[in-house]
Amino acid sequence: MIVLVLSMHAADTYSPFGNWYYVDREPAGLATKIVFGVYQSFLQAFFMALLFLVAGYFSAAAYDRKGFAPFVRDARRASDCQGRAADGAGDDRKLRRLRPHPAQIAAARDRLARFKAHAARCAGSGCLVSRPLTSG
């Protein structure tokens, strides 16, 4: 199942269809559009429904075993572990753990400064770094 999820997101990135946060597309011919269209339609229709079916099957048993409050608490904890705490869904203790260390911030600023200096040196010379980055 996870391989299908990865495959779907890769297809969204590289196919002529899909709306993923990063897009790396080249003009596609009719055969490519048909292959990706059929493949992505199959994946969306088949595995998304199957994933929801499996989740519902196991959720019902977990709810019956735990009861309402522990089920909701565990579901919230699981969603926080998936990275949703970063957008304010978690409590303050969890958010504090997500903040970068000051040394990490300083190192990132240093890398950015070095990148900008290199890009300025390469400006107009055809250096790979001086080309604008495109995301679709």
Image: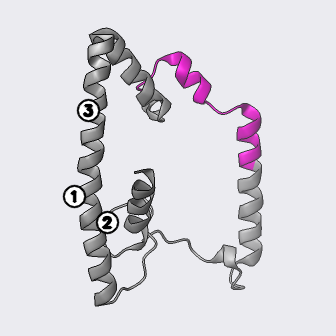
> Which stretch did the figure color magenta?
88-109
- Amino acid type shown at disc 2: Gly
Mark 1 vs 2, N-terminal side:
2
- Amino acid type shown at disc 3: Tyr
- Mark 1 vs mark 3: give the one in front: 3
Image position, residue 70 (x, y; %)? 36, 11
* Label 3 – label 2 distance at C-alpha: 29 Å
Q: Quadrant of residue 57?
A: top left
**Residue 37 horizontal side relative to residue 25, left or right:** left
Say if 82 sits above or below 47 in the image: above
* Label 1 – label 3 distance at C-alpha: 19 Å
Q: Is residue 62 found inside the magenta-colored segment of the image?
A: no
Specify few, some or many for label 1: CA neighbours under 10 Å numbering under 14, 14-19, or 20 or more. Answer: few
Q: Is residue 101 found inside the magenta-colored segment of the image?
A: yes
Specify few, some or many for label 2: CA neighbours under 10 Å numbering under 14, 14-19, or 20 or more. Answer: some
Local secondary structure at mark 3: helix
User: In the rendered image, which residue does mark 2 sit on?
Assistant: 18
Say if 120 sits above or below 34 in the image: above
Local secondary structure at mark 1: helix
User: In the rendered image, which residue does mark 3 sit on?
Assistant: 57
Local secondary structure at mark 2: loop
Mark 1 vs 3, N-terminal side:
1
User: In the rendered image, which residue does mark 1 sit on?
Assistant: 45
Q: Write the residue at 37% across / 65% down.
A: 12
Specify few, some or many for label 3: CA neighbours under 10 Å numbering under 14, 14-19, or 20 or more. Answer: few
- Amino acid type shown at disc 1: Ala
For the residue pair 63 and 33, the one nearer the viewer reads as 63
Say if 66 sits above or below 7 in the image: above
For the residue pair 44 and 65, the one nearer the viewer reads as 65
* Label 1 – label 2 distance at C-alpha: 14 Å
**Residue 7 horizontal side relative to residue 67, left or right:** right
Image position, residue 132 (x, y; %)? 57, 74
